Image (spheres, rainbow, N blue to C red):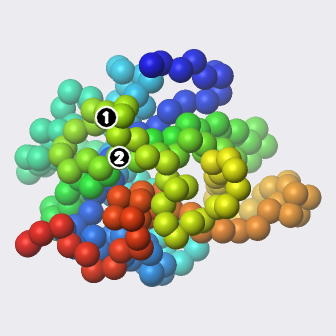
């Protein structure tokens, strides 16, 4: 059933990739200082929109994301049979990491996002993510089954004990924190907490925190 949302909100689907022994999940779960996530992002409410091949890397507290747009009709063939030459550096990086680490689809995560963009700074955003849910997906496919969605906040160990599903607030900026954003954090006494949409989805699928659990022989 389609749901009408306010104009400043939209739905995001992210197909996450990992190795057969979940090395990317383990690096995230152990909070290694250098790690990355690989995902294929789409916007299901906009059928004609592009699909984005994304790498979200972390080096300490610095996060760098690259994303390359691909036609919705062409992305699957591109990732399954990568060409020898690609013009977009972001797509090229995604395909190189995919092949180097033998990455495969694992799970799709869906949520609704409400973004607010600063008109004062070169780059500053505040986003609210709600309704975070997931379903297993081990094929190169973005088609989902509405009956298979499971809420992320139900994943053990319990991250939230309230009666309502949580809203994830993210503050995004360049190297320097805008002064107004610092004042917002202080004014509302916002604590900094780690929350991984991919990590909690994997924990929900396997019903426990998972370390060194493989899907099968390499």
Residue 70 percent location from the top left of the image: 28, 35
Q: Eyeballing the image, is 51 above or below 171?
A: above
Q: Residue at x 44, y 24 (%)?
A: 45
> For this rendering, which residue is in front, 218 or 78?
218
The answer to whether 201 is drawn above or below residue 212 in the figure is above
Q: Residues within 10 Å of mark 1 (few under 14, many from 20)?
A: some
Q: Which mark is residue 144?
A: 1
Element on which disc 1 rests: loop
Residue in the picture at 70% in, 39% down: 116
Q: Are marks 1 and 2 in contact (CB under 8 Å)?
A: yes
Query: Residue 209 occupies which quadrant of the picture?
Result: bottom left
The answer to which of 57 and 40 lies nearer the viewer is 40
Q: Is residue 22 above or below residue 9?
A: below
Answer whether residue 32 is visible to the viewer in this image.
yes
Measuring from the top left, give residue 63's x and y in whole percent: 52, 65
- What secondary structure is marked by label 2? strand
- Please tell me which residue is depicted at 55% across the width and 55% down the height of the picture: 153
Depth check: 64 or 193 in front?
193
Identify the image quadrant of the C terminus.
bottom left
Residue that numbered label 2 is attached to = 135
Answer above or below: position of 12 versus 218: above
Q: Is residue 41 visible?
A: no
CA gap, disc 1 and disc 2: 8 Å
């Amino acid at each position: 059933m389609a749901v009408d949302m306010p104009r400043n909100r939209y739905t995001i689907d992210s197909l996450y990739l990992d190795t057969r022994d979940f090395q990317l999940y383990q690096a995230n779960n152990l909070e290694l200082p250098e790690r990355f996530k690989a995902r294929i992002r789409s916007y299901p409410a906009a059928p004609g929109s592009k699909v984005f091949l994304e790498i979200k890397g972390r080096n300490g507290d610095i996060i760098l994301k690259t994303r390359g747009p691909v036609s919705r009709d062409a992305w699957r063939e591109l990732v399954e049979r990568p060409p020898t030459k690609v013009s977009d550096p972001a797509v090229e990086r995604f395909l190189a990491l995919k092949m180097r680490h033998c990455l495969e689809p694992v799970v799709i995560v869906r949520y609704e996002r409400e973004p607010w963009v600063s008109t004062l700074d070169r780059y500053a955003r505040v986003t609210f993510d709600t309704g975070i849910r997931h379903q297993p997906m081990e094929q190169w496919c973005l088609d989902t089954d509405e009956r298979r969605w499971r809420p992320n906040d139900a994943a053990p160990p319990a991250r939230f004990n309230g009666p309502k599903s949580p809203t994830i607030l993210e503050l995004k900026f360049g190297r320097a924190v805008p002064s107004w954003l610092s004042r917002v954090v202080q004014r509302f006494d916002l604590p900094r907490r780690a929350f991984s949409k991919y990590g909690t989805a994997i924990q929900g699928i396997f019903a426990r925190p998972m370390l060194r659990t493989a899907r099968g022989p390499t």
